Image: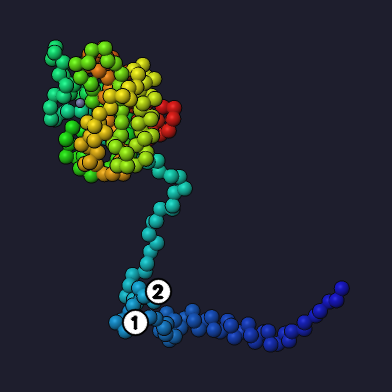
Amino acid sequence: MIKTTVSADPWAVGWMVRGLVLLALLAAFGVPMGVIPIIAVESDLTMPDPEHTGLVVIPLNAPTPTATAVPAPSLTVTPHTPHVGIIAGHSGNDSGAVCPDGLQEVDVNREIARRVVALLTQRGWNVDLLDEFDVRLNGYQADALLSIHADSCNVPGKSGFKITRAEAGFQPLSADVLVDCITRYYAERTGLAFDPYTITYDMTRYHAYYEIDHNTPAAIIETGFMLDDREILTQRPDVVAGGIVDGMVCFIEGESP
Ligand SMILES: [Zn+2]
């Protein structure tokens, strides 16, 4: 092992320390007394534009900047509150289908829609209950839109429900998932069969599809027939609404409502 010894001149070190102390004393007393000037940057028009140079110019008469309370970026992601629209079919416009005994489709739809809205609101969702030709439908933006209708009384022996999105190519692909979710959960909850054979242009070219924002997945459901499915539609609207809610939850929050 080689030991290197640096022999410093004790006198030179002593004078260096003295010099530093003197400088420190001069600065400590000289600056407040104005003996030693502080070279400051004056904010005048000859200065280059700080926005382009990146310089931060602090004018002499500016108050001392104080730290503003900037909240620390949160590491937790704020959960998105689902926003959906429910159209009570024919409401605010007409009666819809009318049965010989006076049962009106609009009343059936309204009762179911009202329950769907209540259940989804209880879940913490932001839900709009909409009329058939609600002005809010123009450019409507939401996570989903569902229009609730019921089938007429004039097809004896006919039972079941149907649901569809707009004609192909007019809506986001997620509309298919919305239809699939409601189809499965509605059938499961109500026991009604899905009837894909009586879907009409009234459903695939439903007016609301052409009014809403094209990124809003939308569908229209015919909850059942007012003759053969009357019992569940009018006596157990909570079950009907529950099936729709399960389907909406499946679409928005994922499987297993
Ligand atoms: Zn209708």
**Residue at x 40% of width, y 74% of height:** 54
Respond yes or no on whether mark 1 lies under 8 Å from ligand 1: no
Which x, y percent locates residue 173?
37, 40
Q: Quadrant of ligand 1?
A: top left
Foreground residue among 51 and 43: 51
Applied colour scheme: rainbow
- Left or right of 33? Residue 97 is left
Of callouts 2 and 1, the N-terminal one: 1
Q: Nearer the viewer, mark 2 or mark 1?
A: 2
Type of amino acid at the residue the image marks with label 1:
Met
User: Where's the N terminus, which quadrant?
Assistant: bottom right
Type of amino acid at the residue the image marks with label 2:
Gly
Asked which secondary structure carries label 2, the reply is: loop
Number of marks in the rendered image: 2
Q: Which residue is mark 2?
A: 54
**Residue at x 38% of width, y 29% of height:** 181
Residue 39 can be seen in this image: yes
Q: Quadrant of residue 185?
A: top left
Asked which secondary structure carries label 1, the reply is: loop
How far, Cα to Cα, is label 2 from label 1? 12 Å
Circle on res. 47? 1
